[in-house]
Amino acid sequence: MDWTASSLSLKLAAWTVILLLPVAIAIARFLAWSRVPLKSGIEALIFMPLVLPPTVLGFYLLVAFSPQSSFGNLLRAAFGTPLVFTFAGILVASLIINLPFAVQPIQRAFEAIPRNVREAAFVSGLSSWETMRRIELPLAWPGIVSAVALTFAHTLGEFGVILMIGGSIPGETQVLSIAIYDRVQAFHIEEAGVMSAVLLAFSLIAIAVVHMLARRQRTGTHAP
């Protein structure tokens, strides 16, 4: 078992969830309640990583993060170093590719809240912020927990984009999925099997949590 790669994967997954969750909640709430004309286009852009091959997305991110690009120069100025082949680079890439996994379940949870509940909160004198904090977030918590589980598990298992952006630098960008690939390349099948079993267990737990919360949310929605 490669404990360095495992700890790096957990670190990447934890930071991805911490940084992405507030953004995902804001975007999901906007998409759930807004009626802007470009809503479908915004949703298509956010959910594109769900259908785009990881290597294609990784290629475009690699070009964007490259110091030779204007955007890459801006990122280098912001972070103080080029993002390619660094932990900061794979973290930024992870935030982008995990956005739909975080937004979608939270958006569905917000959409399941009856509009008259929000209207009653406004009539009672609550501001939009107070309504979200005291009414919407408690009702949407199953979707939020599902988003955390999906984002965490998907980050642990992501391979293509991470390999394109970070390569395989031990202790810096070699996460667990990359370490499995390297072990297979070196014919260390037993080590690869152990690490694959760990990722499989995380995936099964995440799926179980999401389905359990989805059933609970449906039950709560249809309760009298």
Image (spheres, rainbow, N blue to C red):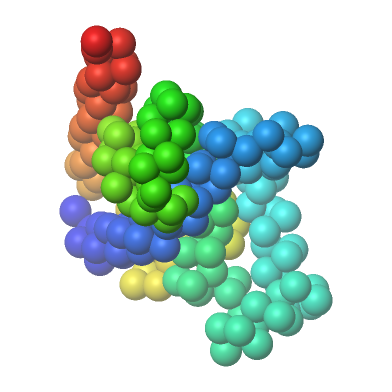
Visible in this render: residue 118? no
Visible in this render: residue 29? yes
Indicate left or right for 30 with 125 as reference: right
Q: Looking at this view, is 102 or 132 the one in front?
A: 132
Residue drawn where x is 53% and y is 64% of the image: 92
Residue 165 falls in image quadrant: bottom right
Q: Where does the image place residue 124, in percent across and percent down from the top left?
A: 36, 42
Residue drawn where x is 24% and y is 63% of the image: 7
Q: Is residue 211 above or below residue 200?
A: above
Q: Where does the image place residue 19, in percent across and percent down from the top left?
A: 41, 62
Indicate left or right for 146 with 201 as reference: right
Residue drawn where x is 63% and y is 52% of the image: 58
Indicate left or right for 26 with 51 as reference: left
Q: Looking at this view, is 20 or 138 the one in front?
A: 138
Indicate left or right for 132 with 103 as reference: left
Residue 218 falls in image quadrant: top left
Q: Where does the image place residue 122, in percent across and percent down from the top left?
A: 44, 42
Q: Where does the image place residue 99, in percent across and percent down from the top left?
A: 52, 47
Picture quarter with the C terminus: top left
Q: Is residue 224 above or below residue 14?
A: above
